[in-house]
Image (cartoon, rainbow, N blue to C red):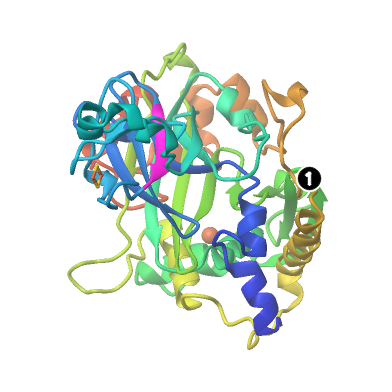
């Protein structure tokens, strides 16, 4: 249970709020690089309550600047890119990725000596492409490294990025990253019931545990069908700091759009069978997944992450933590809240919060706890893949989010050397 004041501390992300300042110490994935092509050069983005535009200019440089032009506030998401920078479509003022105003076409002719453009600076943030994602940094300098999480260094895999907009606050989404027991009920058992069956239900959780490490918390579980030798206990899964889940082969970031909306950005890696190696993926596809069934007006229930979204949205726009009753299964939830409260004090004192990566020795790779590491890094034969209960899901239609485009399904099936029906 939290008081409304403490709940606000965790959930408000605007500039100048304590959590807003804390989250601005990290790079946030905000789009897939493959969303940008010859036609799509400019995209409106709302991030932690700030309205921005993300663009790729004709020279190939990405920029992230204020949504509104410094002249008379036109909407720069309707601007057009030049060799360098983004031009406002109203009177043609041109901005670069550092926020400099490069041109004011009429002023430059009519009143060149005033050099007005030299006094104009638009809000601009750093943006970086890495692992097929576009990352933004809204915090103070010096910026930390964009974390090169270990799976970003893997080869011989098919990667895809899936994005959804979820109309609720980021923090309840992130609490789901440290909630092992929900797997049993929300995914395993509910899926049985959604198929119209009444059983059998999944093996029950016998114990769960949580442990802090440099980049988040690991959560472990023993179920009735497993024991302490199982990787689910020995290695576990990761609540990745500050706003992601990492399961070993995929990441899910919960990026605050504003205090009532969250961008779910997921990155999935599937190692191809050994007979398909070497496999080189030229471009990582990005696709957007719906959350609502337009026919019924209800949320989509058929896919794993869609089920999670229903839990998060069901808690309200901002979860009412004054009226909750935390139980033994929520030990991890209590732990991450405590760590965030501690880190809010660190940031207020001018220090880095947890898991800001600055050490150059991690430039090439930030290692993480990884279940099924051998399969993911050394590969797997087709026969092993077909037999391995953890890997079989890779041979079936995409199970995490609804609406995978046909061309992504086909490229995936081709990479894996399997037939997957639409
Ligand atoms: S409002 Fe943008 S150039 Fe005039
Ligand atoms: Fe889940």
Q: Which residue is drawn at 44% across and 75% down?
A: 198
Assign the magenta stretch its main secondary structure. strand
Image quadrant holding the C terminus, namely top left
Residue 243 spot, x, y in % from top left: 60, 53
Quarter location, residue 409: top left
Whether residue 112 is in magenta: the answer is: no
In this rendering, position of residue 218 left or right of residue 288: right
> What is the secondary structure assignment of the residue under circle 1?
helix
Where residue 218 appears, as percent x and y from the top left, is: 74, 50
* Quarter placement of the N terminus: bottom right
Q: Which residue lies furthest to the top in this view?
A: 278
Q: Is residue 180 visible?
A: no
| Residue farthest toward the bottom in the current orientation of the protein | 323
Question: Magenta residues, as a range?
Answer: 62-66
Q: Residues within 10 Å of mark 1 (few under 14, many from 20)?
A: some
**Where residue 87 appears, x then y in whole percent?**
26, 34
Where residue 267 appears, as percent x and y from the top left, is 48, 39
**Image point 24% across, 74% down: which residue?**
297
Q: Which residue is drawn at 26% across and 28% down?
A: 108
Horizontally, residue 211 falls left or right of residue 236, namely right
Q: Nearer the viewer, residue 49 or 111?
A: 111
Q: Which image quarter: residue 6?
A: bottom right
- Ligand 1 visible in quadrant: top left
The residue at which mark 1 appears reads as 234
Question: In this picture, is 133 found above or below 361?
Answer: below
């Amino acid at each position: 249970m939290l008081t409304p004041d403490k709940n606000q501390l965790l959930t408000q992300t605007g500039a100048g709020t304590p959590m807003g300042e804390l989250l601005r110490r990290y790079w946030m994935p905000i789009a897939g690089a493959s969303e940008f092509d010859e036609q799509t050069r400019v995209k409106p983005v709302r991030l932690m309550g700030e309205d921005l535009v993300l663009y790729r200019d004709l020279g190939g440089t990405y920029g992230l600047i204020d949504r509104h032009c410094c002249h008379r506030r036109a909407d720069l998401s309707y601007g057009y890119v030049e060799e360098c920078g983004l031009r406002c479509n109203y009177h043609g003022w041109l901005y670069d990725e550092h926020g400099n105003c490069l041109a004011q076409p009429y002023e430059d002719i009519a009143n060149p000596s005033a050099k007005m453009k030299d006094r104009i600076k638009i809000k601009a943030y750093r943006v970086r492409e890495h692992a097929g994602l576009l990352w933004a940094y809204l915090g103070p300098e010096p910026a930390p490294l964009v974390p090169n999480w270990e799976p970003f260094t893997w080869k011989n895999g098919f990667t895809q990025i899936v994005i959804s907009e979820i109309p609720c606050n980021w923090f309840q989404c992130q609490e789901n990253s440290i909630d092992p027991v929900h797997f049993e009920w929300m995914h395993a058992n509910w899926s049985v019931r959604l198929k119209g069956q009444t059983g059998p239900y999944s093996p029950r959780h016998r114990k769960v545990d949580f442990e802090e490490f440099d980049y988040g918390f690991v959560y472990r579980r023993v179920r009735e069908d497993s024991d302490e030798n199982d990787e689910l206990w020995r290695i576990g899964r990761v609540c990745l700091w500050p706003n992601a889940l990492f399961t070993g082969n995929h990441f899910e970031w919960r990026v605050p759009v504003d205090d009532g909306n969250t961008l779910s950005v997921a990155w999935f890696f599937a190692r191809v069978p050994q007979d398909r190696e070497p496999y080189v993926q030229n471009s990582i596809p990005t696709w957007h997944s719906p959350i609502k069934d337009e026919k019924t007006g209800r949320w989509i229930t058929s896919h794993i992450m869609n089920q999670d979204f229903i839990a998060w949205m069901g808690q309200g726009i901002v979860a009412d933590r004054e009226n909750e009753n935390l139980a033994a299964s929520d030990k991890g939830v209590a732990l991450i809240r405590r760590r965030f409260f501690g880190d809010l004090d660190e940031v207020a004192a001018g220090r880095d919060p947890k898991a800001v990566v600055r050490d150059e020795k991690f430039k090439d790779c930030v290692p993480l706890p990884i279940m099924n590491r051998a399969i993911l890094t050394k590969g797997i034969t087709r026969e092993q893949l077909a037999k391995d209960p953890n890997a079989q899901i890779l041979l079936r239609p995409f199970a995490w989010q609804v609406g995978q485009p046909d061309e992504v399904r086909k490229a995936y099936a081709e990479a894996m050397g399997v037939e997957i029906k639409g």
